[in-house]
């Protein structure tokens, strides 16, 4: 709604409508609705701005209605717009008595064009005059303001309601077309792009009504954050989209595509990001201006070949979005390592190890358009707050800051004083008082695993408040019970991380174990205390939650989860036999029970004959941990595979596959690396191609996703040919994780090899391929199994 300053205090408003004007005016309650709507808002003139698509051609069309109960004032309004060539208006059949109807030839002229034209015209026509009052009053009356209504109808009087473009899932905003050139005075920068807030509001309209999904419509350039959708992902998505829009307008030949920032979570999850909601409120970013996962269907855009994708804050698409890989045209990310071979080598990418992706986005503005930052202080506050939060207020002790972070923050601080931005964001993130206890649990939750014998499921919920604060919540008990019932969980770990009030970079950790079974809760507590190096000491808990202070503050969920999974798997050994056989003696029955284990394959429980697998258990082993994140190393030695001449070879291979899956589920609760040793493997031991092709799709998605690298050692022509043959059955993302090492020395460039036990055939093959002999210390460690010292899998 715009107000017109005039002696008569005329108020003008505009409503955008997603159906034809004829359809809207044909509604039986339209007269009462218009009168009530205008009266409640004290509006004298209301523009009905209609946008819809033609049934057959799917071409966008516009119509305009002018509602006013004062005939003379309506005539002035009609005169202000009907004479504007830029609109290309032609009259339509008459509607209700107080509405004049027009077809609009210029479909790019949205409400942002119509309102300024009407307001400017009214201001001119309603100016106080020194001439006799009768002269300006009579002039408009002589104009043919009534004639357009009585002219022949140029299009059908009743038009169907046409659904908007199919790539929009939920219509949430007033639909408008993006206008390439707006009249002056619309809050534009010098280069033609509105300020940051207007840009976001415009995206909300664009996502509803920009184009149809048919071929030939314009492309949509989506700036996609990662699926965790933390503050850095959100801010870098919005800011970089604004940067691209400005860059496009500054170009000599601007593209016709629209740029859309995209939050990779459902809209319902947005309130859980409390630090983001706090910051966006402070910076006047309204949720209605944000595009979420359930607002726009990326698959429809992809299928219609209209999608262009910029990845921010990640450089590898998640499994469920990997089909978009061909649409990626740019990457901006602060995570090291670029996945070679996935994307086109020509795409621009800005990948640097810094504390925050927002640092790289801000650097783009500072290098190419610093004046845009000076004109948008809220954009600067968003970037500053994100960088400061990600780098713990530029504290080197946090280990998350690079020199470029400090340089960018200094330049941004020259534009906007950061003040207490960090403390406010830190308080919002680590003291989420606006969330219920149930929301705290689901905000950052991961399923850990299930005991195959007892059926007990376990999960881990990370919280950004202390365990004591969580347990003191009045809705804690109901929330835990509901959370577990909905997910079928028997045990839940509460992994709590907070920071000291006087030093926001100094972490504190605590651990809670929730279980309604007191015996099972006690067993879990004993196992977690005795296993691993978490430094757990009992603390004050409640009836159904065992509480512990965690001395090892580096023991994150990545460290805690494998220990917890080992506890769940250990329940299998304690479980009683499901089908006891009375004729067996007790010792034989127990031995038989332990001769079989179960594993879930594609949702079905498969029994593993451990007696059949026993001679080949050293095919797969635990090779220690790699890197600062302590990724598990899983070693697969092909020379330990069965000979194809073995009786029941196919059955052995199937059970061996089930066994390997069960080991992976134990060792790889989180990210892991696979080392495949092919050296010393006779042709008769190499698996059949059809077995490999059948087994790969049976791997659980979690196992495939968690594998970060596959390093193949001593692979010759035949095994590489097998990989090429399997290419149609394996995703592109798999090949980004694949590496080859000619010798064991080359392998050391990828992973730590100190804890890997290399079989003798592998060592012999390595020497043949020109590898250097391993050190005596390593040899002793790697061949410790020769002295009967075996590494047992938890």
Image (tube, helix red, strand yellow):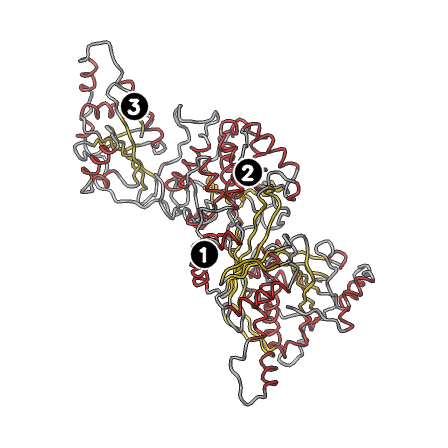
State which mark lies toward you, 3 or 2: 2
Give the side of residue 53 with respect to residue 318, left or right: left
State which mark lies toward you, 3 or 1: 1
Q: In the image, which disc is placed on residue 476?
A: 1
Q: In the image, which disc is placed on residue 238?
A: none
Can you identify the residue that label 2 sits on? 422
- Residue 654, image x and y in percent? 59, 73
Q: Mark 2 and mark 1: span between their CA atoms?
A: 29 Å
Badge 2 crowding class, 10 Å Cα cut-off, few under 14, some 14 to 19, many 20 or more, is many
- Residue 365, image x and y in percent? 55, 32
* SS assignment at label 1: helix
Can you identify the residue that label 3 sits on? 4
Q: Mark 3 and mark 1: span between their CA atoms?
A: 55 Å
Q: Quadrant of the C terminus?
A: bottom right
Above or below, comparing residue 538 to residue 659 in the picture: above
- Residue 93, image x and y in percent? 20, 34
* SS assignment at label 2: helix
């Amino acid at each position: 709604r715009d107000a017109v300053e005039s002696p008569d205090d005329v108020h003008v408003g505009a409503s955008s409508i997603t159906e034809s004007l004829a359809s809207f005016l044909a509604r039986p309650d339209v007269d009462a609705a218009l009168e009530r709507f205008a009266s409640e808002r004290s509006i004298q003139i209301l523009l009905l701005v209609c946008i819809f698509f033609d049934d057959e051609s799917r071409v966008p069309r516009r119509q305009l209605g002018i509602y006013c109960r004062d005939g003379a004032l309506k005539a002035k309004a009609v005169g202000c717009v009907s004479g504007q060539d830029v609109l290309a208006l032609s009259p339509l059949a008459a509607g209700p008595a107080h509405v004049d109807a027009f077809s609009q030839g210029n479909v790019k002229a949205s409400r942002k064009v119509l309102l300024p034209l009407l307001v400017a015209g009214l201001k001119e026509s309603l100016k106080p005059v020194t001439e006799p009052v009768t002269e300006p009053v009579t002039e408009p009356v002589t104009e043919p303001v009534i004639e357009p209504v009585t002219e022949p109808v140029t299009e059908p009087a009743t038009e169907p309601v046409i659904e908007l473009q199919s790539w929009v899932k939920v219509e949430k905003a007033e639909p408008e077309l993006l206008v390439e050139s707006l009249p002056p005075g619309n809050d534009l920068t010098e280069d033609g792009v509105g300020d940051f807030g207007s840009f976001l509001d415009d995206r909300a309209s664009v996502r509803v009504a920009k184009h149809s999904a048919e071929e030939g419509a314009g492309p949509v350039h989506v700036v996609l954050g990662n699926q965790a959708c933390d503050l850095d992902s959100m801010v870098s998505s919005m800011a970089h989209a604004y940067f691209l829009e400005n860059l496009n307008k500054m170009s000599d030949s601007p593209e016709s595509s629209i740029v859309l920032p995209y939050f990779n979570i459902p809209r319902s999850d947005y309130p859980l990001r409390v630090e983001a909601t706090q910051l966006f409120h402070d910076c006047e970013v309204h949720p209605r201006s944000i595009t979420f996962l359930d607002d726009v269907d990326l698959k429809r855009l992809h299928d219609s070949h209209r999608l262009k994708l910029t990845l921010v804050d990640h450089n590898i698409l998640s499994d469920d979005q990997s089909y978009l890989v061909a649409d990626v045209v740019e990457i901006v990310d602060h995570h090291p390592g670029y996945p070679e071979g996935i994307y086109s080598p020509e795409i621009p990418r800005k990948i640097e190890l810094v504390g925050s992706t927002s640092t790289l986005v801000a650097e783009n503005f500072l290098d190419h358009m610093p004046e845009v930052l000076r004109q948008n202080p809220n954009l600067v506050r968003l970037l500053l707050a994100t960088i400061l939060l990600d780098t713990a207020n530029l504290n080197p002790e946090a280990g998350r800051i690079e020199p470029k972070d400090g340089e960018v923050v200094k330049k941004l601080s020259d534009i906007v004083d950061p003040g207490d931005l960090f403390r406010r964001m830190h308080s919002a993130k680590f003291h989420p008082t606006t969330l219920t206890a149930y929301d705290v649990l689901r905000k950052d939750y991961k399923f850990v695993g299930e005991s195959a014998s007892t059926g007990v499921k376990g999960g881990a919920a990370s919280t950004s408040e202390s365990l004591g604060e969580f347990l003191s919540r009045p809705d804690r008990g109901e929330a835990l019970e509901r959370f577990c019932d909905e997910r079928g969980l028997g045990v839940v770990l509460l992994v709590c991380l907070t920071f000291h009030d006087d030093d926001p970079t100094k972490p504190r950790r605590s651990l809670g174990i929730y279980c309604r079974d007191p015996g099972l809760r006690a067993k879990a507590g004993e196992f977690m205390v005795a296993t691993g190096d978490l430094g757990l000491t009992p603390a004050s808990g409640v009836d159904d939650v065992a509480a512990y202070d965690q001395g090892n503050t580096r023991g994150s969920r990545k460290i805690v989860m494998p220990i917890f999974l080992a506890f769940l798997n250990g329940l299998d050994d304690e479980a009683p036999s499901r089908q006891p056989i009375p004729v067996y003696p007790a010792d034989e029955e127990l031995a038989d029970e332990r001769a079989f284990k179960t594993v879930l394959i594609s949702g079905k429980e498969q029994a593993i004959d451990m007696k059949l697998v026993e001679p080949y258990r050293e095919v797969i082993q635990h090779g220690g941990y790699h890197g600062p994140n302590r990724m598990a190393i899983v070693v697969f030695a092909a020379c330990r595979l069965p000979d194809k001449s073995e009786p029941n070879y196919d059955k052995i291979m199937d059970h061996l596959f089930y066994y390997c899956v069960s080991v992976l589920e134990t060792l790889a609760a989180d990210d892991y690396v696979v080392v495949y040793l092919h050296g010393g493997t006779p042709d008769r031991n190499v698996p059949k191609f059809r077995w490999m092709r059948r087994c790969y799709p049976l791997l659980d998605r979690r196992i495939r996703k968690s594998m970060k690298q596959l390093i193949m050692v001593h692979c010759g022509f035949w095994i590489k040919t097998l990989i090429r043959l399997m290419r149609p059955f394996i995703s592109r993302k798999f090949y980004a994780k694949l590496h080859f090492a000619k010798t064991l020395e080359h392998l050391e460039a990828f992973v730590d090899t100190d804890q890997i036990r290399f079989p003798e055939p592998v060592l012999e093959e390595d020497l043949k391929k020109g590898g250097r002999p391993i050190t005596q210390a390593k040899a002793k460690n790697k061949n410790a199994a020769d002295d009967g010292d075996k590494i047992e899998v938890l």
